[in-house]
Image: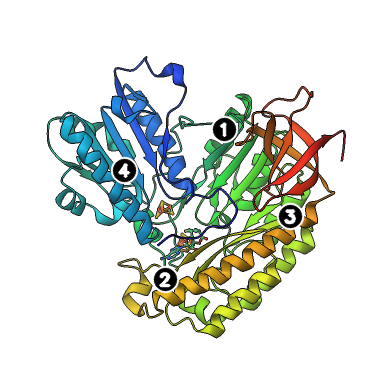
Amino acid sequence: MQDLVANKVHDETRQGEAFAPFANDENQYNKKFYIESYGCQMNFSDSEIVASILQNEGFGATRNYEEADLVLLNTCSIREKAEQTVRKRLTEFRKIKDSRPGLLVGVLGCMAERLKSKFLEEEKLVDLVVGPDAYRTLPVLIEEAETGQKSVNVLLSREETYADISPVRLDTNGVTAFISIMRGCNNMCSFCVVPFTRGRERSRDVHSIIAEAQNLFDRGYKEVTLLGQNVDSYYWIDEVNDEIVTFGKLLEKVALVSPELRVRFSTSHPKDITDEVLLTMSKYDNICNYIHLPLQSGSTRVLQLMNRTYTREWYMAKVKRIREIIPDCGISSDIITGFCTETEEDHTDTLSMMETSAYDMSYMFFYSERPGTLAARRYKDDVPEEVKKRRLKEVVELQNRLSYESNKKDVGKTFKVLIEGNSKKSDADWMGRNSQNKVIVFPKENYNYKKGDYVFVKVNDFTQATLIGEVVKEL
Ligand code: SAH
Ligand code: SF4
Ligand code: F3S
């Protein structure tokens, strides 16, 4: 069964992209690796760390697995379906391996961490199993695997942030990039496997974050997205400047790299997002007015079972506060339907909260029990699948209406848009985003703009996922 996702490119929809950096670099390495990434942006960002480590070992990236010596799948465990997708892909690589015995196949990421050496027993074709905190040991593990041994390292760390490793940007548009600011998660939402696959939360050295942002800007990038499972709990004691750096402070420091560098972040937890963050956002024009604030459920009872530690009222007050401080802020959400014991009334509470929050966009899922999580141990997965699906359908239909209404309100408005590249449909059109993270497509006409430029675009029309506009002189 398909997870349903409305109207936006998402981690889930990006599943299984093959990456290679600069095409003309491909020949300078004697061995080649091919990597596919699944799951969230953190995983895509980790693949760039892995690429950096492998390049130092003489492996160049290729987009074509047929010419690869090493095939890596950076995997996700968040829902059962995510794991099934990877298993299916592995059986496809089994065939290729049969015809090319020297080929090494490795599993990285969250599924590697969750299943550990079970992978080697179950999936006979896998040569390497490497968890998210063990990528530095890849060179040694590959060497071992080359001698025919199976190698595994799934040790989680309390310190590893790969702060000193400069990511090799994969499949980049040269305009937007991700920066990991922390790893792991301490929240223990009862449905979630992430604390088990990614380990304890730890923040990355502020100086290395700013240096990475500066470096990206110097190389022509115009937008960075700061990544963490719960960015609001970023915390760094900066002994150099004798300063405590909270997420609000970090945002400010990144914003100060240049007013021409846009800053985004993901994900915020409703219990942790502070006024300091909101006020910093409103102070700097280049911090985008967009917050991904996952609700999960609109029922306080269910939220409690989920261990989200906020109530319906708390969440509502947060949304109100966001709109007070940043009136034009885009807000999106994650919703789970059919969590353990969810009643029709709880479900109606979710629908009404979505309506009150007026989300511009949501990622919506039906509950998928994950082995080892608090919910799997404590509660019965007792909502029948067809009920989960029906509720999901209702949630998706509501979000479609909310997105439609949100887009409709934008008609006639003019936005500052960062050009990311050609529109998917036509080379005669540019594609970019406004501060609220909405995609806008507009004709190039005879203007002399290029990728990475900021332009003012007036919205004339829209489809479900995209605003359609034209370039104008000013706001
Ligand atoms: N750290 C982020 C999100 C991590 S996972 C946060 O706290 O918001 C992304 C989304 O996947 C979650 O927000 C949740 O909506 C969904 N999700 C996580 N575990 C799930 C499960 N077991 N079943 C269905 N959806 C799940
Ligand atoms: Fe999972 Fe909750 Fe952590 Fe997000 S905050 S990664 S949902 S445990
Ligand atoms: Fe998936 Fe791991 Fe991200 S489980 S969502 S890849 S942190």
Residue 29 placement, left or right of 105: right
Question: Could you tell me how far apart the alpha carbons at marks 1 and 3 are, in whole angstroms?
Answer: 37 Å
**Type of amino acid at the residue the image marks with label 4:** Ala
Residue plotted at (39% across, 31% down): 51
Residue plotted at (62% across, 30% down): 221
- Secondary element at image label 2: loop
- Horizontal and vertical percent for residue 370? 34, 66
Judge whether 24 appears above or below 355 on screen: above
- Secondary element at image label 3: helix
Mark 4 or mark 2, whichever is nearer to me: 2
User: Residue 134, labelled with which disc?
Assistant: 4
Question: Could you tell me how far apart the alpha carbons at marks 4 and 2 are, in whole angstroms?
Answer: 26 Å
Mark 4 or mark 3, whichever is nearer to me: 3
Using the rendered view, name the quadrant where residue 361 is placed: bottom right
| Farthest-out residue, left | 148
Mark 2, residue position: 190
Mark 3, residue position: 407
Question: Could you tell me how far apart the alpha carbons at marks 4 and 1 are, in whole angstroms?
Answer: 24 Å
User: Residue 211, labelled with which disc?
Assistant: 1
- Horizontal and vertical percent for residue 71? 29, 34
Residue plotted at (46% across, 29% down): 168
**Type of amino acid at the residue the image marks with label 2:** Ser
Q: How many marks?
A: 4
- Secondary element at image label 4: loop
Q: Earlier in the sequence, mark 2 or mark 1?
A: 2
Question: Could you tell me how far apart the alpha carbons at marks 4 and 3 are, in whole angstroms?
Answer: 43 Å
Q: Earlier in the sequence, mark 1 or mark 3?
A: 1
| Farthest-out residue, right | 474
